[in-house]
Amino acid sequence: MKFYIATDHAGFHYKAQVIDYVRSKGHEIIDLGPETADRVDYPDYGRKCAEAVKADPGSFGIVICGTGIGISIAANKVPGIRAATCHDAYTARMARAHNNAQILGFGERVVGMGVVQSMIDAFIETSFEGGRHERRVEKIDAIDAFYKKEA
Ligand code: RB5
């Protein structure tokens, strides 16, 4: 699998460890920044990751901020992107199985590295179940399409 990763300053300290972990599992991961722990705005980095994933069909993303919430909200503003703020292996698994999320989000101030690794494992190992979930995901895309027409 190919991943892109981006954080804000509050998620920055996990970034290197997450990159190492994903690579140790045999997957590719591209670092979209930031390069230092200086304060940055999470919408810039959520957007950056979401745009990279959208431009590279079949790829996935990881976004990290303090809570995982703000950076995921920002990523979700990119049409067609589904970023899930997860807290454990169960939510990470469901984000793939039911929501076909392409981006895993979490908070450095919320979960420890052991939980992070279990979420990454679950996200990697789980495929979208399709079926009834396909229709629901299509309805999410329909919301994007509706508001695009209005704009
Ligand atoms: C930064 O202090 C913090 O607000 C940010 O990392 C994130 O938690 C926002 O959702």
Image (cartoon, grey):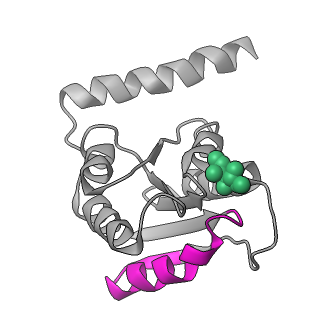
Q: Which residues are magenta?
A: 8-29
Q: Indicate whether 77 appears above or below 56.
A: above
Q: Nearer the viewer, residue 130 or 93?
A: 93
Residue 55 at x, y = what percent?
60, 55
Q: Quadrant of the C terminus?
A: top right
Work out whether 19 lies above or below 117: below
Residue 42 falls within the magenta-colored stretch: no
Measured along the vertical axis of the image, is residue 127 above or below residue 32?
above
- Residue at the (71%, 12%) spot, across then down: 150
The number of numbered discs placed on residues in the rendered structure image is: 0
Which residue is depicted at the point 59% across and 14% down? 146
| Quarter of the figure that contains the N terminus | bottom left
Residue 48: quadrant of the picture: bottom right
Q: Quadrant location of residue 65?
A: bottom right
Look at the image and say whether residue 17 sits in the magenta stretch. Answer: yes
- Percent from the top left, x then y, of residue 50? 60, 51
**1 lies above or below 101:** below
Q: Quadrant of residue 24?
A: bottom left
Q: Residue 30: in sight, yes or no?
A: yes
Expressed as whole percent of the image width and height from the top left, the position of residue 89 reads 27, 57
Is residue 47 something that shows in the picture? no
Q: Which residue occupies 81% across, 65% down?
A: 39
Give residue 93's position: percent from left, percent from top: 26, 51
Please tell me which residue is depicted at 45% across the width and 25% down the height of the picture: 140
